[in-house]
Image (tube, rainbow, N blue to C red):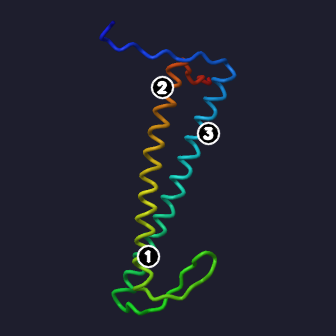
Amino acid sequence: MSTSKAKTKVQPLSDQEIQTNYSRMQSDLQTLAGKVGELEQEAEEHGLVLSTLNEALAEDPDRKCFRLIGGVLVERTVKDVVPALQTNRDGIRKVISNLSEQYKAKEQDFETFKQDYNIRPIQKA
């Protein structure tokens, strides 16, 4: 037995299967990137609202504010809304982190796939 690691053999795929897998992997990466971008925008919006509400919180914690919950506009006080928004923003950031890790893993799998099947982009003149 050899102590050196043998490179794992790539399972032979037809040209159609290679093309299908390539398209699927590319689509998965685009979907993840889109979702990350969408969530980053949402986290930014939460940050803007929180900065505004923190000013109101310093002035008058019992000041009325309105929050949209499940399509229903609900009246609350600033001191009640700020902690909920902070929790939501932190949750969104965790999801972004997880999706970013998934993206990196899928990107690495995609690069490995391209190397295994000797796929190179076509250079347009």
Q: Is residue 92 above or below residue 4?
A: below
**Type of amino acid under label 1:** Ala
Q: Quadrant of the C terminus?
A: top right
Front-lying residue, 70 or 26: 70
The residue furthest top is: 1
Q: Position of residue 15 (x, y in %)?
A: 67, 18
Q: Which residue is mark 3?
A: 27
Q: Which residue is mark 2?
A: 112
Q: Are marks 1 and 3 in contact (CB under 8 Å)?
A: no
Residue at 44% x, 40% y: name it: 104
First in sequence, mark 1 or 2: give its number.
Answer: 1
The amino acid type, in three-letter code, at marker 2 is Thr
The extreme right residue here reads: 16
Percent from the top left, x then y, of residue 75? 54, 88
Which residue is identified by label 1?
Answer: 84
Amino acid at dot 3: Ser
